[in-house]
Image (cartoon, rainbow, N blue to C red):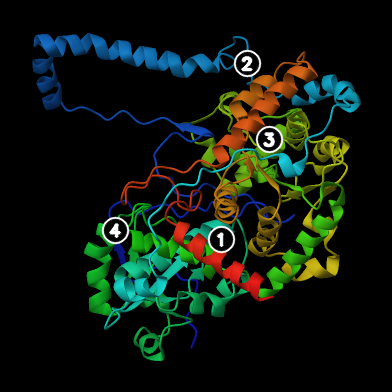
């Protein structure tokens, strides 16, 4: 009998620092796919949209006496005068960029003027007859091949690391967020199951009022392929045994739920979760997003690689339509030998509202954004202890790029108006107005809605994660991928592209801090902008082949964004399998 999937409460084992359940990854879905709040972060920091003022803690009389006694010493007296100076200088550093806020001239790059720059540059841009960049020669940097240790025999790895006389129990996880945050949760769940020598129940997907997608695992991924690929590493079942369900009255909320903090270390799972699993035979972890640190033993890291790049295959319905969309993009790109650019554009209404950035819509835009924030996040942005600083957000490169800005950037890099572009996005804010300049610069602009028929898309409408999976696939096989805002969608794509393109992400990741300064100058020449954009493309090329240093199990970067070196052996194994298939044909 299938378990009840969406549940709350139950026997919760709350640990210190139970993490937030916010989502993060579904970006780039369809016209109905919303933008997520951020997922739990690895490092603390001040939100780019709202700065929270921390309340001053009261000091008791006894504490004041102790403090006064300490200050009387010479060293303490020195600090007594030094600390106020540090505080004032820090305050000035924070307040300095807010010059517009306190009445001074706006900081360079803090005001959206891109539409004015476009009007100024369009005649020169349109008449530019210099040779266009060829898509097949965009990426010039190549990874230097180094000598690596021979990859272990994978079948031997089964027995050495994962073969066990007995399994310890069942692991249930509830993945939250959008498509790629769920993907992260699935990979981490397999890793945790391998770590605990547990049987993994196919992960449940938590319904979220932001994405509003009721899809389950089998709607997005091929369950049988997932189970068979992991066989020998981690045992996976579709549901709990009848006896266990009966024991818990057929309600998984009655199963012990352990609330694990974000980025929990291996020691936590072995010290806290493992004993409960052994004693009760089944544990549940909900929510389960980013609940395992990046630094894990090599054989556990391998499970993440195996899951992400081999076990997780989209369902047949998604795969079939995605393949058609890729082929249609190739056909539309005949002038460039079937090569095209894919742009992940995050200019949806709720994404703009969450960023708290200001564009050129005036009072009407302000009212729409306030309404969207209230609808999506209720009173969070109206709290007295939160300050919204849109100008600073723009200077720091945290505002979503507009379609116009993306177009000017790409034209400046050397892509001409014959270039085919696939746009992966949700419903663009005021699409008719903001997409027009991009279409003017790049007439060959396509989306899944324009490539597929209404009948082909009908089964996926209303399912943001399934629509995002279509976008993901078309972006994956593009010659150039452009990320404009960050998040789980581009991070997973960049990692996946590194995996299949011999270590190169083939991704344009613009320096938005630099870009806003350039697009703030309404008198900038087309030649100057082109030179700057060509440098930015070259920098993306250079960074595309970067591999982080990983010593033993001390990894600080995401393996989903930087899969090498740990996924190298799987990469080599899959490449060998493809070669064998080609030679046998």
> In the rendered structure, are the residues bearing label 4 and label 2 in contact, judged by CB atoms less than 8 Å apart?
no
Helix, strand or loop under label 2: loop
Helix, strand or loop under label 4: helix
Dot 4 or dot 2: first in sequence order is 2
Dot 4 or dot 1: first in sequence order is 1
**Relative to residue 437, is residue 451 depicted above or below?**
below
The residue carrying pointer 3 sits among few (fewer than 14), some (14 to 19) or many (20 or more) residues within 10 Å by Cα, namely: many
Dot 2 or dot 1: first in sequence order is 2
Dot 4 or dot 3: first in sequence order is 4
Looking at the image, which residue is at 75% across and 25% down?
114
The residue carrying pointer 1 sits among few (fewer than 14), some (14 to 19) or many (20 or more) residues within 10 Å by Cα, namely: some
Q: Rounded to the nearest whole Å, what is the CA distance between mark 3 and mark 2?
A: 17 Å
Q: Quadrant of the C terminus?
A: bottom right
> Is residue 412 left or right of 284 when viewed as pictured?
right
Residue 287 visible somewhere in the drawing: no
Q: Position of residue 558 (x, y in %)?
A: 45, 49
Q: Rounded to the nearest whole Å, what is the CA distance between mark 4 and mark 1?
A: 28 Å
Q: Rounded to the nearest whole Å, what is the CA distance between mark 4 and mark 3?
A: 38 Å
Residue on which disc 3 sits:
401
Q: Nearer the viewer, mark 4 or mark 3?
A: 4
Residue on which disc 4 sits:
266
Q: Nearer the viewer, mark 4 or mark 2?
A: 4
Q: Position of residue 213 (x, y in %)?
A: 62, 64
Residue on which disc 2 sits:
108
Q: Nearer the viewer, residue 322 or 565?
A: 565
Looking at the image, which residue is at 46% across and 57% down?
568
Q: Which mark is residue 208?
A: 1
Q: Nearer the viewer, mark 2 or mark 1?
A: 2
Q: Position of residue 469 (x, y in %)?
A: 65, 61
Q: Which mark is residue 414?
A: none
> In the rendered structure, are the residues bearing label 4 and label 1 in contact, judged by CB atoms less than 8 Å apart?
no
Looking at the image, which residue is at 61% across and 42% down?
373
């Amino acid at each position: 009998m299938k378990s009840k999937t969406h549940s709350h409460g139950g026997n919760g084992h709350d640990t210190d620092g139970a993490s937030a359940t916010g989502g993060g990854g579904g970006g780039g879905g369809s016209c109905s796919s919303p933008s997520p709040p951020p997922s739990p972060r690895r490092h603390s920091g001040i939100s780019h949209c709202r700065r929270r003022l921390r309340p001053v803690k009261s000091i008791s009389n006894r504490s004041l006496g102790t403090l006064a006694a300490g200050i009387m010493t010479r060293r303490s007296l020195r600090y007594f005068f030094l600390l106020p100076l540090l505080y004032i200088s820090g305050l000035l550093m924070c307040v300095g960029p807010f010059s517009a806020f306190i009445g001074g001239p706006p900081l360079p790059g803090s005001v959206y003027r891109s539409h004015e720059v476009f009007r100024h540059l369009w005649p020169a841009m349109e008449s530019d007859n210099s040779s266009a960049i060829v898509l097949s020669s965009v990426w010039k940097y190549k990874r230097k091949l180094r000598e690596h240790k021979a990859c272990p025999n994978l079948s031997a790895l089964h027995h050495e690391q994962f073969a066990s006389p007995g399994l310890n129990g069942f692991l249930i996880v509830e993945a939250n967020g959008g498509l790629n945050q769920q993907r992260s949760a699935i990979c981490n769940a397999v890793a945790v199951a391998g770590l605990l020598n547990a049987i993994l129940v196919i992960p449940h997907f938590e319904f979220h009022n932001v994405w509003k997608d009721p899809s389950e695992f089998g709607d997005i991924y091929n369950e049988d392929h997932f189970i068979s690929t992991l066989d020998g590493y981690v045992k996976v079942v579709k549901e709990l045994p009848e006896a266990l369900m009966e024991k818990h009255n057929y309600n998984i909320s009655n199963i012990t739920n352990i609330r694990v903090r974000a980025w929990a270390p291996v020691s936590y799972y072995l010290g806290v979760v493992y004993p409960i699993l052994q004693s009760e035979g089944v544990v549940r972890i909900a929510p389960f997003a980013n609940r395992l640190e990046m630094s894990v033993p090599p054989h556990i890291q391998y499970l993440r690689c195996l899951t992400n790049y081999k076990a997780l295959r989209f369902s047949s319905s998604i795969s079939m339509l995605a393949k058609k969309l890729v082929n249609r993009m190739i056909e539309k790109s005949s002038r460039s030998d079937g090569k095209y650019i894919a742009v992940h554009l995050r200019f949806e209404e709720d994404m703009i509202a969450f960023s708290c950035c200001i564009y050129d819509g005036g009072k009407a835009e302000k009212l729409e954004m306030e309404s969207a924030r209230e609808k999506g996040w209720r009173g969070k942005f109206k709290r007295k202890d939160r300050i919204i600083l849109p100008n600073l957000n723009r200077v720091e490169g945290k505002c979503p790029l507009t379609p116009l800005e993306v177009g000017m950037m790409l034209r400046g890099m050397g892509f001409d108006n014959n270039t085919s572009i696939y746009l992966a996005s949700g419903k663009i804010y005021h699409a008719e107005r903001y997409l027009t300049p991009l279409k003017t610069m790049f007439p060959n602009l396509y989306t899944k809605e324009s490539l597929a028929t209404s009948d082909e898309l009908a089964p996926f409408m209303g399912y943001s994660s399934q629509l995002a999976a279509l976008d993901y696939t078309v972006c994956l096989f593009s010659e150039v991928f452009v990320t404009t805002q960050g998040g789980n969608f581009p991070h997973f794509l960049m990692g996946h592209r590194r995996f299949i393109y011999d270590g190169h992400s083939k991704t344009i990741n613009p320096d938005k801090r630099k870009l806003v300064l350039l697009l703030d100058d309404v008198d900038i020449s087309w030649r100057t902008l082109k030179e700057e954009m060509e440098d930015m493309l070259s920098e993306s090329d250079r960074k595309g082949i970067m591999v982080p240093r990983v010593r033993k199990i001390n990894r600080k970067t995401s393996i989903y964004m930087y899969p090498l070196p740990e996924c190298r052996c799987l990469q080599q194994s899959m490449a060998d399998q493809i070669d064998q298939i080609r030679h046998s044909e």
